[in-house]
Image: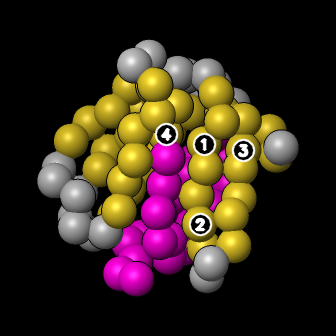
Amino acid sequence: MEKFILNITASSGEFFQGECESLTLPTADGQYGVQAGHSPVLVAIHMGILHFEVNGESQDILVGDGIAEVTPAYVMVLVDRKSVV
């Protein structure tokens, strides 16, 4: 599976930076999925569970409102807070 660079930063500082296989963002309209090669887009994030996979292992974190910049090679997630689930 192709990978992309994921950076998750909360108001308290950087939480994660590294290669990622897939990402699911919580939005007002439901879940928004991202994989490598995704078209560029800005996504408004709403409080909920952010799910991502690294080396075949799933990770979930509770995030507050924020924004994600998605490009084919990387995703930058900026949220006002995060908690490990």
Distance, label 1 to label 4, CA atoms, is 5 Å
Distance, label 1 to label 2, CA atoms, is 10 Å
Q: Which residues are magenta?
A: 1-24
The location of residue 85, given as percent across then percent down, is 83, 43
Q: Earlier in the sequence, mark 2 or mark 4?
A: 4
Describe the colour scheme in one phrase: secondary structure
Tell which of 48 and 9 is nearer to you.
Answer: 48
- Magenta segment: does it hold 2? yes
Q: Are marks 3 and 1 in contact (CB under 8 Å)?
A: yes
The residue pinned by badge 2 equals 53
Tell which of 8 and 11 is nearer to you.
Answer: 8
Distance, label 3 to label 1, CA atoms, is 5 Å
What's the mark number on residue 78? none
Identify whether 44 is placed above or below 54.
Answer: above
Question: Is residue 35 in view?
Answer: yes
Q: Earlier in the sequence, mark 1 or mark 4?
A: 4
The residue pinned by badge 4 equals 25
Distance, label 2 to label 4, CA atoms, is 12 Å
Q: In the image, what residue occupies the spot 49% across and 47% down? A: 24
Q: Is residue 27 left or right of residue 9?
A: left
Query: Splitting the image into 4 quarters, where does residue 69 fall?
Result: top left
